[in-house]
Image (spheres, grey):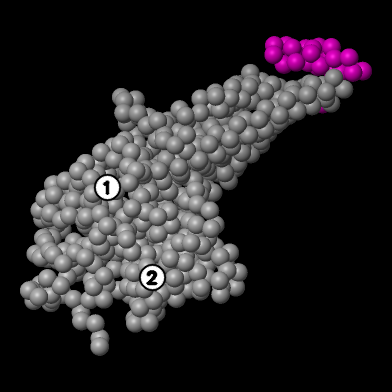
Amino acid sequence: MTDLPLRPRRSGWWERSPAWSTLAACIRGHPLLFGGVVVAMAVATVLESVSLVAFFPVFQVVLHPEGLSRVTGVLGWVVSLAQRLPVGGVLPGAMVLLATVMICRAGVVLLREWLIARLSGRVLWDVENSVLARYAGASPAQLSEQKQGTLLFDCTVAPTRVALLVRKIPQWIMEWLKVAAITVVLLVAFPVPTMVLSVVTAGVMGLLHALSLRIAYTSGKGRAEANAEQMTLLHELLTGMRHLTIFCTKEVWLSRFREQTRRYTTLLARFHLWLAIPRPIIELAIVLLLLVSVGLLSAWSPTHMTSALPVTGLFAVGLFQLVPSLSGLGRLRMEIHEALPNAERVGQALTIPVVAVPHGQRRFDHLRDGVVLDGVSFAYPGRPPVLRGLSVAFRKGLCTAIVGPSGSGKTTVLNLVLGLLEPSAGCILVDGTPLQAYDRNGWLRRIGFMAQEPFIFRGTVVENILIGRRDYSRQQVIQAATIALADEFIRQLPHGYETILGERGTTLSGGQQQRLAIARAVLGDPDLLVLDEATSALDAVSEQLVQQAIATATRHRTVILVAHGETMVASAGWVVVLNQGRAVEQGPPEQLRGRRGAFTQLTVPVAG
């Protein structure tokens, strides 16, 4: 299952609430497991009643055997059943009956908990994958508006708490059924004290319920927000550690993190305090009621007290079975309400419209003519246009350099060509066909891409060049590394191509990372190479090595590169100069250099 079956909201309260609507969608995906949980709960409820009643024959035989013949009704039927068991007497029969019922009850309870655990595990899998798939399908422009910590929270922590809800809700319902079953048995055996108990317990639980639910929901919502902000700050701190250290500002991020941690722990402590309140109050009320009942019975008639001991024992067992259930009801209800904000977050993540870049089904095999931007404009939501009516042709077999000041739209042009963004106006044509008509994955498989900051992850050198692609051999990987002038330094690593690289490539120099990225880009002999300021962050020696690697990799290929210096531009056959989203100059670099216009002002002469 890759997507939750969320339906339009209906008139029912469970459909009007985003949290309950999300939970309903989670459960709808697994009808057999959910049905098994319902059946197991019903059987466990019946056995709960039977197990309590099964205590009575044991109490009757031990405490008042003379009264066996006078027991009537349901209790009399249970005593009669114990007498008929062929085990050598009433007491052994009563014990075998009780043991049998308790074993069956334990088995059904374990089955019920296993089914609930399976259901919650499936829901966790569904929600995590559905949220992640939804974010993965969004356009970069939409994702750029979200905090990284919020995305991480919605993909990991929130689904875990939704799965917790799926576990807690059946348990909460089961506790209610258990309370109802025990109460029915006690009403039959001991009506007046049970009715008094019901009134007192309902009053106590109603008061606690009114006070605690608001606190539980507010605590859960606040903790979810604090946790998401913690993840954002942690991501920023770890990725920007070098810069924060140099500017001596790590303490600013640490103090922000501590503030969110303080908020989270304060809300957590308050929640657990309210979580602990119901049990001692309910235990005290039940024990006092039991003592009062026994005292009144003893004062009324000492002789009647003896004959009533079996029923009193049954009442005591029932009360002490009720204690964990009644306290569990309050605890589970608070835990459910505390987790509801996370279900709301998941519901929002799954229902907020995803702005995906459209693409068609037409197969793309090879680039025949080139790529043309025809009157293309683009603007990020709520921002001024980045590109304004841009018309540029990237011809096959030609290296085209894009230059321009910061913010002129150079990287946006690359993202549009890659198909990661959709033009606000105009059209992108590939061999005369709109880019949106092609299958996007087929188009991207024929493109080699290299960014200014290469994506190096924890894995071997081979894995970093393949970056998850499985249809290339080791020999092809080595050939790509050789083209990128990376084979020599790779073989000098401790384990060669099997050397494990640290996260973000910290074990490699900047130039080595870039040459590894070039090898990744040329693997599979792509039709189009797209290079985004590949040497802008390198020192002179590393830049020269990377430029040599790029020159080797781009020979006889169609190339689009964003350049910042004269050396990179010199290898281009065509230059496009951007300024404020428009092409202010276009042409061969020698021709533009002779005009001494915008191009000459932007490029940096080569030393010497």
Residue farthest toward the bottom in the current orientation of the protein: 608
- How crowded pointer 2 is (Cα within 10 Å; few <14, some 14-19, many 20+) is rated as many
Does the magenta segment cover residue 126?
A: no
Numbered disc 2: secondary structure:
helix
- Pair 1/2: label in front: 1
Can you tell which mark lies on residue 549? Answer: 2
**Would you say the magenta stretch is mainly helix, strand or loop?**
helix
Q: Which image quadrant: the C terminus?
A: bottom left
Q: Residue at x 38, y 82 (%)?
A: 541
Q: Which residues are magenta?
A: 63-90
| Viewer-side residue, 406 vs 534 | 534
Q: Is residue 165 above or below residue 59?
A: below
Instruction: List the residue tagged with mark 1.
Output: 368
Quadrant location of residue 134? Answer: top left
Quadrant location of residue 66? Answer: top right
Does the magenta segment cover residue 68?
A: yes
x%, y% of residue 100? 78, 24
Numbered disc 1: secondary structure:
loop
Q: Residue at x 56, y 65 (%)?
A: 497
Q: Is residue 230 left or right of residue 71?
A: left
x%, y% of residue 80? 79, 12
Quadrant location of residue 264? Answer: bottom left
Q: Amino acid at mark 1?
A: Arg
Q: Is residue 94 above or below residue 114?
A: above
Q: Amino acid at mark 2?
A: Ala
Q: Determine if residue 168 is in view.
A: no
Q: Is residue 383 left or right of residue 217?
A: left
Q: Is residue 454 left or right of residue 493?
A: left
Q: Is residue 116 above or below residue 85?
A: below
x%, y% of residue 543? 35, 77
